[in-house]
Image (cartoon, rainbow, N blue to C red):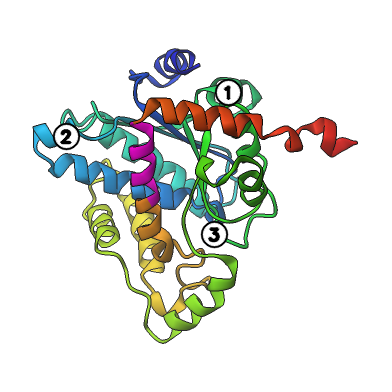
Amino acid sequence: AKEKLAVYAKEHMGLDLDCDALFDVQFKRIHEYKRQLLNCFYIIHRYLAIKSASPSERAKFQKRVCFIGGKAAPAYVNAKTIIKLVGNIGEVVNNDPDVSPYLKVGFVPNYSVTVAQVICPASDISEHISTAGTEASGTSNMKFVMNGGLIIGTMDGANIEIREEGGDETMFIFGCLEDDVPKIKERAQNGNYPIDPRMQKVFDTVRSGRFACGDSEAQAKFCGLIDKLCNITAAGTWDGDRYLLINDFPSYVAAQELVDKTYADQAKWASLSIQAACSMAKFSTDRTIS
């Protein structure tokens, strides 16, 4: 399945993929609550970590392929800005000889059922990272686990039921719980909403224009997204970090580190993959329709 995706990526995106890499995917509607932007920030964090490492240290990083895809509503400006950012991150990362052997990034165009038939079976880990309390259910998480992929996600939507069926180990959980959100907003109103230094470094890198790729209009929009997030007293509202990306970033990074560590043990990963896929009968259309 990964080889099939590698052929597809070469044909449609001009990317050469290493099938021994961990395939990390996020495919769904592009929407701020689904937090593709949080994924972007993590990819930039990973890029900076690999870039600043010595050649011998770089070789110790788990190789990753990060693909994001999905459609945005025509008038949804922020969603389209996020798509542009993904594309620009890919442009920078994939053309950096220091980093590209260990990290590949791409926005897969025109996501559809046909594309999903290639993506879903090839995923090692899929991202279902909406802010707790915002996702009614979600179905892409079901599709990916049915195909043997594991999930990195929040306690939100159908992730909760999938985890109940598959077991805690088959899902890499991070982030606040729905019950935590009011307290986080209250603390932020009092000025207590710290930005993790690693995230601050990501913000500074984006603001520096490193991912603008010569497009000043895109750069202004990228900075606009970050400036809004940094209005810390308004976290949890439309004037600030509405979906609590800053709050959840440290635990997201920790969960991603656990993904790398677990993937290094291929026998364990295969066992978890089988365990997860075998637990998905509850989510079959045969049961849900009847």
Asked if the residue at tag 2 contacts the one at tag 3, i.e. Cβ–Cβ closer than 8 Å, the answer is no
Residue placed at 26% from the left, 35% from the top?
93
Q: Is residue 80 above or below residue 15?
A: below
Relative to 202, 138 lies left or right: right
Q: Is residue 178 above or below residue 254?
A: below
Q: Which residues are magenta?
A: 255-264
Eye-nearest disc, 3 or 1: 3
Which callout, 3 or 1, points at the residue further toward the start of the chain?
A: 1
Magenta stretch: residue 67 in it?
no
| Mark 2, residue position | 58
Residue placed at 33% from the left, 44% from the top?
43
Q: Indicate which disc residue 115 carries.
A: 1
Q: Does dot 3 land on a helix, a strand or a loop?
A: loop
Q: Return the residue nearer the eye: 67 or 224.
A: 67
Q: CA distance from mark 3 to mark 2?
A: 32 Å
Number of residues whose C-alpha sits closer than 10 Å to that of mark 3, classed few (under 14), some (14–19) or many (20 or more): many
Q: Indicate which disc residue 131 carries.
A: 3
Relative to 182, 143 lies left or right: right
Q: CA distance from mark 2 to mark 1?
A: 32 Å
Residue 146 location, quadrant = top right
Q: CA distance from mark 3 to mark 1?
A: 26 Å
Residue 188 location, quadrant = bottom left
Which callout, 3 or 2, points at the residue further toward the start of the chain?
A: 2
* Three-letter amino acid code at the position of disc 1: Val
Q: Position of residue 114 (x, y in %)?
A: 62, 20
